Image: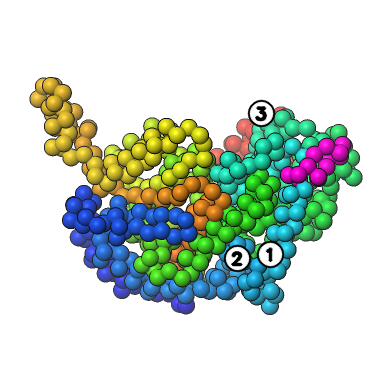
Amino acid sequence: MHLIPLTDAPAFQALRRHYDDASDWHMRDLFSHQPERFSRMSLDAAGLFLDYSKNRLDDTTLSLLMELARERHVEEHRDAMFAGEKINTTEGRSVLHTALRAPRDRKLVVNGQEVMQEVHAVLDHVGEFAERVRSGKWLGRSSRPITDIVNIGIGGSDLGPEMVCRALRSRAKQGLNLHFVANVDGHDLDAVLAKLDPDTTLFVVASKTFTTRETMLNAQSARDWFLQTGNEAELAKHFVAVSTNAKAVAEFGIDTENMFPFWDWVGGRYSVWSAIGLPVALAIGIDGFREFLAGAHEMDRHFRTAPLERNMPVILGMLGVWYRNFFQCGSLSIAPYHQDLAQFPAYLQQLDMESNGKQVSMIGNPVDIATGPLVWGDVGTNGQHAYFQLLHLGTDMVPVDFIAALKPTHVLPVHHAVLLANCFAQSEALMRGKDAAEVRAELASQGITDDELAALLPHKVFPGNRPSNTILMDQLTPPTLGALIALYEHKVFVQGVVWGINSFDQWGVELGKVLAKNIEPEINGSLRPEAHDSSTNGLIARAKAALGK
Ligand code: F6P
């Protein structure tokens, strides 16, 4: 499928003309002219409800956006992904995280090999192992059950399992404590190890490549810590690995019997569905993990079969294109109104920014248009008391995705109505704002002087017309969380297709890795500093002096 530059696409040009009008509309007027706007611009899929009515668009905008999706062959690219075609062209790989959540009886051949049996064999192995640990049958070196699991991994080998374990903590087995160590900063591992007893601790070394410097150093230090009080023969009871690299796992000293494999067609940021999700299975049990996979599969089914106009990931993706390429919005804020989703913005940051932070097209030409936005955010209501000021009154327009569960999993009923009221109030405030007449009437009723009123008025006017989506679920459960993650995966995919980029490589992380490898021995003093620029040389010199090297 050879794509013409996006800006040459007829639907893109039609959208440009349409934008000239649409950019002047105020959502307050759109709502008053279209009383049924909420029911027209909302939909249910896979246990999620999306309200996208608080966006700066009308029916024409939507149909032009869908026309653009068709012109960019979103459906054909989607089908190619699900069929296992090598759509990750720069790495020559298929992109099949969706296979990890497909049912056992599905047939899928990749590189001439049937993969579904293997996928389910690993899942069964994950399940058996998780149940042995959870039931206390897996014993450590002193014949005591495991009480603490430490996942050592970074990026996709950390963010997914950590975010999901946090999100589903209300379902987690009590007495089995999960810890996540990602950072090469020794403060991270040190603080975790200080709390642990090696006799009852299990380390999960999670790395697709098993070469990532941070993970390998943390794993080595954890191994050294363990060996201070034990011997190599006992390692097998306390170290397991999740990786695609059996050779490196064996070289590290982990019994490959205790290695949970996955495959090169699973990208790191898409790997929580694979054995990388082992901590999730340990926390909530294999049945819960299977429900999580089933929720994602339900979203896959929706994405594959729903017409574009009623397709949740496509709608979210195309709205993102509308704001990024026409309104020039450079960022997207994620506002989960659920404390257990506290790490969801950070998770989406990797998913979206590592996928769509690209400046050349699939065929290596510079793109002619802005691609992925900055993705950031924090839980509500906390964000309201921190950065929402800028969302309401700053000079940039920042679209917001609000995410909430209608029912809590806690037992403090008063809190939930307050939480939801705040969530809905924020999207209302962003949309309608508060005009000068409303502010004037309010100030006048407070009996202040005309001069005081005139001075305050401009500060208290909210322009509104700031877009948001609201995603609701009944409750945050394994299936709804699975569907939510899959929704964003497919949204990012749709945008990557429209922009004509490869959403599945990540060359942007390589240069820093290579340079750090050069600088490390220079800081340690074993190598003479290379001729860097004066800034880098100066920083290295200061570090050497401080560390006495
Ligand atoms: O450096 C980026 C990255 O490659 C991510 O894409 C990946 O999730 C992370 O590093 C960890 O990689 P690995 O699982 O191979 O240790």
Residue at left offset 21%, top offset 36%: 461
Nearest-to-viewer mark from 2 and 3: 2
Q: Confirm whether the magenta stretch covers residue 142.
A: yes
- Please report contact status of discs 2 and 1: CB closer than 8 Å, yes or no: yes
> Please, is residue 385 above or below residue 466 in the view?
above
Residue toward you, 322 or 40: 40
Task: Give the mark nearest the N terminus, 2 or 3.
Answer: 2
Indicate the quadrant containing the C terminus: top left, top right, bottom left or bottom right.
Answer: top right
Residue under pointer 1? 119
Is the residue at mark 3 in contact range of ligand 1, meaning its CB lies under 8 Å from it? no
Residue under pointer 2? 102
- Whole-percent x, y for residue 155 in the image: 60, 49
How packed mark 1 is, by other alpha carbons closer than 10 Å (few <14, some 14-19, many 20 or more), is many
First to last magenta residue range? 133-145
Instruction: Report the side of 475 relative to 463 (left or right).
Output: right
Label 1 is placed on what type of residue?
Val
Mark 2 and mark 3: span between their CA atoms?
54 Å
Label 2 is placed on what type of residue?
Ala
Q: Confirm whether the magenta stretch covers residue 419.
A: no
Mark 3 and mark 1: span between their CA atoms?
50 Å
- Whole-percent x, y for residue 185 in the image: 65, 37
Kindly tell me whether residue 225 is visible in this rendering: no
Q: Count of labels shown?
A: 3
Q: Main secondary structure of the magenta part?
A: loop
